[in-house]
Amino acid sequence: MSTQPRRVENLHTDKGKVPVYATGIVEQPWDDYSDDDHATWSTLYARQREILPGRACDEFLAAQDAMGMSADRIPKFSELNRVLAAATGWTLMGVEGLLPELDFFDHLANRRFPVTWWIRKPEQIDYIEEPDLFHDLFGHVPLLMNPVFADYMEAYGKGGVKAHGIGADALQNLTRLYWYTVEFGLIKQSGGGQAGGLRIYGSGIVSSKAESVHSLESAAPNRIGFDLERIMRTRYRIDSYQKTYFVIDSFEQLIQATQPDFTPIYARLSRQASLPAGEVLDTDTVYQRGTGEGWPTDADV
Ligand code: HBI
Ligand code: FE
């Protein structure tokens, strides 16, 4: 998600005052969740787990089960942290919402994943603009159990702290990488499955019912093989389905791509124009050249 993060000052919720620390870290007020909150989690969880087998990568579903997540109720961060910390050294921490980028990167660089403590209202069940608990906990957290993906997320955070020191263009390149991998990435799954063996690992997709189907089965979007510098040049959509989904061969491919120092890459990219979200290049490995049906005509970011 890349809407402007808002600093949290004195936070008063309808559940009374939730303690907020200077850095926006919030204890999960688990006892204060309403029946509606738990019902929203249950509805969304059951709905996604109904359609994800055969669409999400096996690692995602296995990790979600291994963490003990279920449709019963909103999971307790403290309980998940016991399993997660033992698996990959990552821990969750409650936050009010989007953090300033440098705070966010610094948390990732130290294997801390910020999870929004509140869940959307029942009337927002199908779409919410900014990341809520369901997007973060259901979408982002399970793959932190996967050692290779966990390494990638730490490397991403360290790269973000460095990019923050370099400047806005570097940050934009890196945000595109996050968008087309962590949020909206597809992966080749050994063993076939839907859509010629492509599966979902991106959090923005797995936490969305419609996009879980669209990303794999619609004729509209492009599906193109992962290429780090090509992705860093590619603009994206915030308010609609992606026009292009990028496909990795494996999580190892992600970690290998983040090994080199990005500074020379940023320098090279600064001399190249950014690409429209729906563009297909001659040099692309094309799994599907989309029809473009339904694509918005306004500007990509
Ligand atoms: N803050 N809590 C939170 N969660 C995010 O996913 C997040 C953020 N701040 C910035 C951000 N994401 C994006 O700008 C990333 O691309 C860095
Ligand atoms: Fe996200």
Image (cartoon, helix red, strand yellow):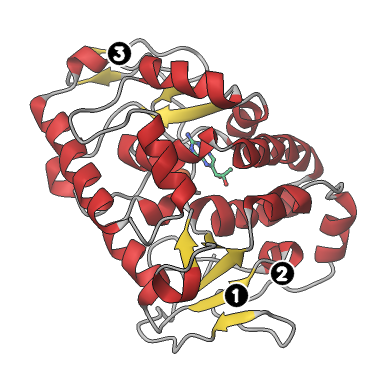
Looking at the image, is mark 3 or mark 2 earlier in the sequence? 3
Disc 2 residue type?
Answer: Arg
Above or below — where is 190 with respect to 71? below
Residue in the picture at 33% in, 19% down? 11
Above or below — where is 301 with respect to 157? below
Looking at the image, is mark 1 or mark 2 earlier in the sequence? 1
Q: Is residue 227 left or right of residue 217?
A: right
What secondary structure is marked by label 1? strand
- Residues at discs 1 and 3 in contact (Cβ within 8 Å): no
For disc 3, the marked residue is 18
Disc 1 residue type?
Answer: Ile
The spot of residue 153 in percent (x, y) is: 62, 39
Disc 3 residue type?
Answer: Val
For disc 2, the marked residue is 230
The spot of residue 145 in percent (x, y) is: 52, 33
Above or below — where is 54 with respect to 222? above
Query: Splitting the image into 4 quarters, where does residue 97 fall?
Result: top left
For residue 224, which numbered disc appears in the image? Answer: 1
Q: Residues within 10 Å of mark 3 (few under 14, many from 20)?
A: some
What secondary structure is marked by label 3? loop
What secondary structure is marked by label 2? helix
Residue in the picture at 71% in, 38% down? 155
Label 3 C-beta lies within 8 Å of the nearest ligand 1 atom? no
The spot of residue 169 in percent (x, y) is: 73, 55
Q: Give the mark toward the camera: 3 or 2.
A: 2
State the CA–CA distance, disc 1 to disc 3: 44 Å
Above or below — where is 39 with respect to 251? above
Q: Give the mark toward the camera: 1 or 3.
A: 1
- Can residue 132 be seen in this snapshot? yes
State the CA–CA distance, disc 3 to disc 2: 43 Å
Q: Give the mark toward the camera: 1 or 2.
A: 1
